[in-house]
Amino acid sequence: METSRSEAIVLTAMDYRESDRIVTLFTLQHGKVRGVAKGAKRSVRRFGPALEPFARLSVELVVREGLSSVRSADIVTLYPRIRQDLRSIGLAGYAVELVDRYLPDGAPSPRLFRLLTAYLERLDGGESVPSDRRFFEANFLNILGYRISLDRCSSCGVDLLPGAERRVGGAGTVLCAGCGRYGAPIGPDTAALLARCVATGRFGAVLFPPAFLQEVGPLLDGAIATHLTRPLNSLAFLKQIEPD
């Protein structure tokens, strides 16, 4: 079996048997890989403290169907400032759980890898604001082919002009005023900012005022939840530490 080296973000890690760890990695070259790191709990030279959630690594591995073999891991960064702040831990955990739950095994996505690392860097820099989570979600859905349609009613198909009234429909869809008369409103300015999120790849370029966050939140939450088979553990934690 051929050994390769790849950049990776740790999505999950758990102890296995007496000295091993099973990890799920989002690698730049191979996509999502689940593997066993033999002796990881006692081999400081080969692994040290590397195999922790949302750590960024350079890993040496043998990719196989089923469980791959993680031979060694060098730390690029553990994002230490994230780990000093409860809110940042919650947001980083949410981001990596989303990637783990959505991404199939063995499907490389360099754009998603760049988005995830940019978000972790933003959190680690202490610059993150509530808009960044929604920016991450909008681009996450777009990259994976689940972009929210803002220009056409998801029910009747009528075109929604820039100033048109929009409403939140089921499963994170956007409806016209007639089809979504009971849904929460999405103002034209909120829709314009959401569209800008996927037109730029730079965190901080789009800022949602508090009132706009209240509008865009249910829409993105619904769009994400509709593609999941069970609730996100990290989302429950986030709701505990920042209920608004």
Image (spheres, rainbow, N blue to C red):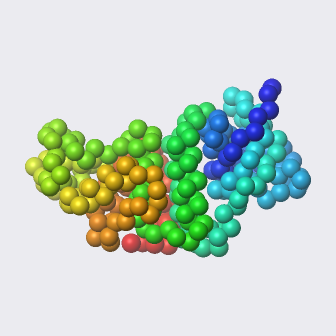
Q: Position of residue 184 (x, y in %)?
A: 22, 60
The residue at the point 69 percent across, 32 percent down is 66
Q: Residue furthest top?
A: 1
On screen, residue 3 versus residue 202, left or right, reads: right
Count of marks placed on residues: 0
Vertical placement of residue 52 versus 4, above or below: below
**Quadrant location of the C terminus?**
bottom left
Q: Position of residue 217 (x, y in %)?
A: 34, 61
On screen, residue 200 versus residue 81, left or right, reads: left
The residue at the point 59 percent across, 61 percent down is 121
The residue at the point 69 percent across, 28 percent down is 65
Q: Residue furthest left?
A: 178
157 or 160: which is nearer to us? Answer: 160
Q: Is residue 56 visible?
A: yes
121 or 9: which is nearer to us? Answer: 121
Please identify the quarter of the rendering in which residue 90 is found: bottom right
Please identify the quarter of the rendering in which residue 84 is found: bottom right
Q: Position of residue 103 (x, y in %)?
A: 53, 40
On screen, residue 174 versus residue 34, left or right, reads: left
The residue at the point 14 percent across, 40 percent down is 158
Please identify the quarter of the rendering in which residue 147 is found: top left
Q: Position of residue 98 (x, y in %)?
A: 51, 50
**Quadrant location of the N terminus?**
top right
On screen, residue 193 versus residue 238, left or right, reads: left
Q: Is residue 20 visible?
A: no
141 or 238: which is nearer to us? Answer: 141
147 or 68: which is nearer to us? Answer: 147
